[in-house]
Image (cartoon, rainbow, N blue to C red):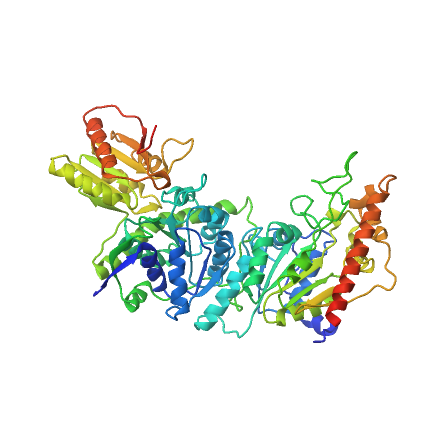
Amino acid sequence: MEQKLVALSGNEAVAYAFKQARPHVAAAFPITPQTEMMHKYAEFVANGESTTEMILVESEHSAMSAAVGSAAAGARTFTATSSAGFALMWEIVYVAASLRLPICMALVNRALSGNINIHCDHSDSMGGRDAGWIHLFSENAQEAYDNGVMSWRIAEHGDVRLPTMVNYDGFIISHTADALHMLPDEAAYDFIGKYQHKYSLLDVENPVTVGPLDLTDYYFEHKTSQLAACARAPEIVQAVSDEYGELTGRHYSFAEEYKLDDAEMVIVVLGSSAGTCKDVIDEYREKGVKAGMLKIRMFRPFPNAYIAKILAGRKAVAVLDRSASFGGFGGPVFTEVRSAMYGQNVPVHDYIYGLGGRDFDLSQVATVIDNLQNVASGGELEDVNLLGVRL
Amino acid sequence: MAVNLKKLTQNEDLLAGGHRACAGCTGSNILRQIMLTAGPDTVVGGATGCMEVVTTIFPYTAWKTSFIHSAFENSAATVSGVEAAFRSLKKHGDLPVEREKMNFIAFGGDGGTYDIGLQSLSGAMERGHNMLYVCYDNEAYMNTGIQRSSATPLGAHTSTAPAGSVKQGKEQHRKDLTKIMVAHNIPYVAQTTPFHWKDLATKVEKALSCDGPAFLNILMPCTVGWHFDTAIGIELSKEAVECNFWPLFEVENGIYKINQKPKDPSPVADWMQKQGRFKHLFKPGNEHILEASQKWVDEEWQKLLKLEASGAE
């Protein structure tokens, strides 16, 4: 498929990806660094490039609430937010997943308050990791765009019907101009397909009650069916990604495996930091150090079996967490990876890094690889470490 | 627009019996009256609260139209999403069943409307969605156990502002939400009660036929929270109007009209005396609270008369 090479910020790229799905409704409230994405979308509507109805609400809580109403009415619906905005949505983030509404959301990752900070970390997304959404992470604008196009197919698939969020790092991806390939509008829409709603509130011939009181006798069964949908999702994520790969030549899976074939030591990371890791891994490879990287793209549902298999037999694993779990045992990515590795004799250590947009630089990755080498040869290391902070 | 009882009673009852409202509840009565006027091409959204809880419990529903509940504070935002979806699906030719017009009604109790849902309501009204918001105002958080809300009147006993040896129930007057909604400059705002069926049906009809958002505040006597005999709820809604505690009025495009002016308003204490929530106010030493209640009602009534007169000029 012939694709245009364009220079866009991550926010603009995702605005295009969402526009190409021809959504019926968008509901959003401004928050930095998501703002530019909705500015771009509003321009599409103002210029007649999109016929989406925009609901410009008075809070993110209402953005997610209006999205729930719209999706329950049978409309293809999206929203976008960051940080505190996602936190304010939180109650309804659960409702959207529980009602099995295939809403798509751009979550432009930004640190949660307090203190207030507008820069990137993953505390927003991680705070909602158990809410029942599919979480896709992106390394750059290209991946944010690709995840944006694919998110509709995944969310709306009959075996899934779960809301899906496209995560991309605030400022680092959202506000940086990047070169990417974009599908022509028609081809993108052909791939995404026309929305097939289920149980629309507007079907006056088949009225439906959505969100009833659900107590001890049925609630657990409904949660079980939600768990089953989450369990079915990875297969659909892979199938959609395969089809997208055939169309675009860009292939995706649950994770990207970078120089992993013979890697003895592995860095596990999410988002834009992967690019930095790749550069340093290349340097170490030239020195003969067998380091590699696993960049998790699908954090929810967590691909535990895949992780356990791909990391099996490695000499040491370092997990990079761009959020802290206060009072927990390491960051959320570490907790998941270490748990997936249960029963294997592979040392897994955690690094909390980059909170509130703290620069993640080459020297930090070098420290991680040096430590990996030390651990691989029997050295000791704390389970949970801090990277790039004054102590 | 003439509402007639014979015609109304021939319409399908869209709220089925068998729901779990308390004996003597006037809320289900309000919903049935609204739905008789609205008809089947309607989507209803409810805030968490009594009426949501008693009309749905999986796998049952009392609603014969589509109904959605999402949370406590967001019925206005949720229904605004449904309404926007209707416009968009219609525009794109994607409606499941073709309709030129549908009714969108969001409701909430006073807790979900005056308090936690006020922002969501204000936003939806300002955005101009074609929807009707109905507050069934029973003057406290009844569903969670009769806690005070900003709609609870002065002196009322509630579980969070109880009458005790030192305090005598709620220490503030109620918030005037109806006028807050008038300040949104929406096409239609009105107050009514379930006793005044003709007034209620006419107001629902006006609210649903105006172009843009509309708001109805409906007093809902609650046998459990107000402590009265289950037989007299509707009677109490009638008397609330006769003592000027709950005037029937409407504001159409900014013009006030009082729909009923009691010739000789009864003392508000007569109405209060029939409700256990005010029982302590009739003990010696609490006369000043009754007086303050009467003064407040009188002053509010005078303000309303002035608002009506200013529109007539």
Examine the image and state in which quarter residue A217 appears: top right
Identified at 18% across, 39% down, the residue is: A281
Regarding residue B16, the answer to whether it shows in the image is no
Position in image of residue A74 (x %, y %): 46, 63
From what the image shows, is residue A271 above or below residue B214?
above
Regarding residue A338, the answer to whether it shows in the image is yes
B66 displayed left or right of A302: right
Q: Which of A358 and B171 is in front in this view?
A: A358
Examine the image and state in which quarter residue A19 appears: bottom left
Q: Quadrant of the N terminus of chain A?
A: bottom left
B176 displayed left or right of A152: right
Position in image of residue B73 (x %, y %): 57, 51
Identified at 59% across, 57% down, the residue is: B121
A323 displayed left or right of A268: right
Position in image of residue B61 (x %, y %): 59, 57
Q: Nearer the viewer, residue B184 or A15?
A: B184
From what the image shows, is residue B249 above or below residue A327?
below
Q: Quadrant of the C terminus of chain A?
A: top left
Q: Nearer the viewer, residue A256 or B143?
A: A256
Q: How many labels does the image show?
A: 0
